[in-house]
Image (cartoon, helix red, strand yellow):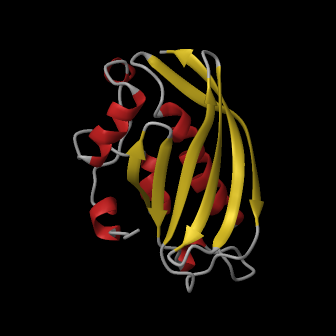
Amino acid sequence: MSIAPLAGLARAVGEIPIEKLREYSGIELFRAMMAGELPSAPIAATLGFWLQEAEPGRVVFAAVPEKRHYNPIGSVHGGFAATLLDSAMSCAVHSQLAKGFGYTTLEFKINLVRPITDKTGPITCEGKSLAVGKRIGTSEGRIIDAAGKLYAHGTATCLIFEI
């Protein structure tokens, strides 16, 4: 899987008005974001990650960990991994929603299995939906490096609602 950081980070960021959100199914929304027709989430610019792939039930974000993501003890802060996992897992659920529906994360659990540093290199975070119903969606996610080494994994539960 190749990672093109500059292409992902060059996209516009911003909030999408609710009226506009109602016009897109989940997968249509992500495809429009990747095509540059809609802005990416501001948090993606803040932390330096981007939406790389999206298909129904599966979303991939990518990032290159840097010193700016560090905690005081010399590794990437766990909140960076948590944000990537929350984004990928919840967006995997959203990718299966029809027009007029949205979600919010109810809960998520993550396991950090090895430290991420600026020497880790490019990472991807893949979220996959497990079950998406009328009110609840569940998903799982994994953060891996270019060699496929696992750094963190998790699960999420999302509340689904009309917007």
Residue 161: give x, y in percent of width and height.
Answer: 57, 16
Left or right relative to 65: residue 33: left
The image quadrant of residue 137 is: top right
Q: In this view, does 116 lie above or below 129?
A: below
What residue is drawn where x is 33% and y is 61%? 9
Q: Nearer the viewer, residue 118 or 109?
A: 109
Q: Is residue 153 above or below residue 77?
A: above
Q: Which of 138 and 66 is in front in this view?
A: 138
What residue is drawn where x is 72% and y is 78%? 72
- Number of numbered tags placed on the structure image: 0
Q: Residue furthest bottom?
A: 119
Residue 45: give x, y in percent of width and height.
Answer: 41, 56
Q: Nearer the viewer, residue 133 or 64?
A: 133
The image quadrant of residue 81 is: bottom right
What residue is drawn where x is 48% and y is 29%? 96
What residue is drawn where x is 33% and y is 24%? 24
Left or right relative to 87: residue 54: left
Residue 30: give x, y in percent of width and height.
Answer: 36, 39
Left or right relative to 11: residue 149: right
Residue 102: give x, y in percent of width and height.
Answer: 50, 23
Q: For the N terminus, which image quadrant?
A: bottom left
